[in-house]
Image (tube, rainbow, N blue to C red):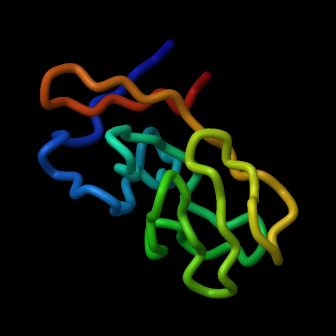
Amino acid sequence: MSFVRVCALSDLADDSATAFEVDGVAVCLARSQGEVLALLDECSHAEVALSDGEVHAGTVECWLHGSRFDLRTGKPIGPPATEAVTTYPVRVDGDDVLVDVKE
C-alpha cells in the first residue's frame, strides 16, 4: 500500500466532505458517523464534484441531481446514478489522515 498524508483529522468537520488531490487523483474525503472515508470526487452520473454535496448517515448526495452514494462502498443508493464510484483505503494515524489511491 502507498498511503499519502492528505490532511489533519482536525481539518475535517463531522458530516462534511472536502476535495483534495492525491497523487493526481481528485479525492472526496468525508467524515461521517465517526469514520473518515475517501472516494473519487466525481459523480458517476453527472461527472460533478461529490465534495460539493451533503454528507449524512454514511452517504454523500450529489448536489446536481440528488444521487446518493454509500461512502464505504461507493455504490449508488438513489437514482439517477447506477454506477459505483471508486473508493480508497483511509488510515488515521494520530491527527494525520492518509489515503492510498494506488491500490
**Residue 43 horizontal/vertical position (percent):** 67, 67
Where, by quadrant of the figure, is residue 35 drawn?
A: top left
As drawn, the residue found furthest toward the bottom would be: 64
Q: Is residue 55 above or below residue 79?
A: above
How many callouts does the rendering have? 0
**Residue 76 horizontal/vertical position (percent):** 75, 59
Residue at horizontal 44%, vertical 65%? 55
Where, by quadrant of the figure, is residue 77 drawn?
A: bottom right
Image quadrant in which the C terminus is located: top right
Foreground residue among 17 and 32 = 32
Q: Is residue 89 above or below residue 33?
A: above
As drawn, the residue found furthest toward the top would be: 1
Foreground residue among 40 and 22 = 40
Residue at horizontal 23%, vertical 52%? 12
Q: Is residue 66 above or below residue 41?
A: below
Left or right of residue 41: residue 23: left
**Residue 82 horizontal/vertical position (percent):** 87, 63
**Residue 44 horizontal/vertical position (percent):** 75, 64
Residue at horizontal 66%, vertical 81%? 66
Left or right of residue 83: residue 78: left
Q: Is residue 45 above or below residue 100?
A: below
Residue at horizontal 29%, vertical 39%? 6
Left or right of residue 21: residue 92: left
